[in-house]
Image (cartoon, rainbow, N blue to C red):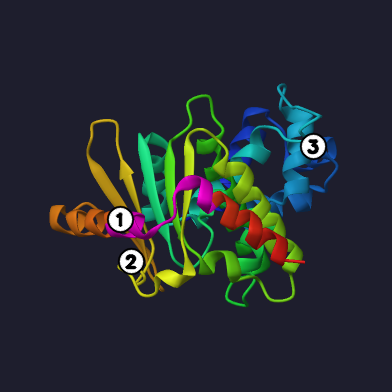
Amino acid sequence: MGNAIDYVREELRLLRAHLRMSQDDFGRVIGYSGSHVSSVETGGRPPTKDYMLAVDRAHDPAFDPDAAEGRFGRMLRELSKLEQTPSWLREWIELEREAALLRWYEPAFVPGIFQTEAYARGMMDNGLLLPDQIDQRVASRLDRQSILTRDVPVPVVAALDAMVLRRGIIGRPDTMREQLEQLVKISELPHVQILVVPAETGIYPGLQGGFILATLSDGSVVAHLDHQVRAQIVNHTEDLATLQRTWEAVRGEALPRRQSLELIKEAAQTWT
């Protein structure tokens, strides 16, 4: 079984076998031909969302008509999500969820957990990804934002370079305005601080690249670094010490919370 889709195919075949139905009978119940059922099970056709919906409607006793999704629809969605998420990112997402504190420095873009759907999509719509890949990555990014709104949210301190507020998506000023307005709303949450390093600061430590420091419940710290090709999780003591010194230097250059909020509000007004 090579991938998530192969697993789903096998589960569909096992369901039909458990029901003691031929492919023709199974297809008749869900509104597809027997040859179509055979093709899905053997790899000739993909198990589409519509196909899974038909299976769930017919055979999932817990099917939710309001959500228009059942067991097999969820299986396809979640397994596809896992397959398209690199192992290092899955590991980081778990660390992010378990963190007692996140310290996030970003010199170029709005941090992912603060992004609107339109901003995230605009960032990824650069010709390097297929539409399905963009959809999957945007959905994953938005899902990560739940750490800010759950019953016990993760405290976040984010430091942004002022250029983050000025660098927009070409031809979409409304997207940037919406994004900055969302930053304002998020910054007013009691567990979130968004600090801005003003443009007049000049060159300062940290401009080489963004990073995230996650303090875990046991007091240990791990970091996330993003590069052109891939990102990595850092837990080497000396590297963490360097990143924490850089964080303190960046925070020392940043404006206080209220001044930063006013700067974000002013920047939002310029995107018309």
Residue positioned 37% across, 63% down in the render: 231
In the image, 241 versus 262, the foreground residue is 262
**Sequence order check, earlier mark of 2 and 1:** 2
Q: Which residue is mark 1?
A: 247
Residue type at mark 1 is: Trp
Q: Which residue is mark 2?
A: 206
Residue 37 lies left or right of residue 263; in this view the side is: right
Q: Is residue 89 above or below residue 63?
A: below
In the image, 99 versus 229, the foreground residue is 99
Disc 3 and disc 1 in contact, CB within 8 angstroms: no
Residue 143 in the image: state x and y as whole percent.
57, 44
User: Which type of secondary structure does the marked residue at label 3 adopt?
Assistant: helix
Residue 179 in the image: state x and y as whole percent.
65, 56
Location of residue 265 by image quarter: bottom right
In the image, 158 versus 60, the foreground residue is 158
Residue type at mark 3 is: Asp
Residue density around tag 3, few if under 14, some if 14–19, many if 20 or more, within 10 Å: some
User: Which type of secondary structure does the marked residue at label 1 adopt?
Assistant: helix
User: How much space separates mark 3 and mark 1, taking CA atoms?
Assistant: 63 Å
Magenta stretch: give its range. 249-260
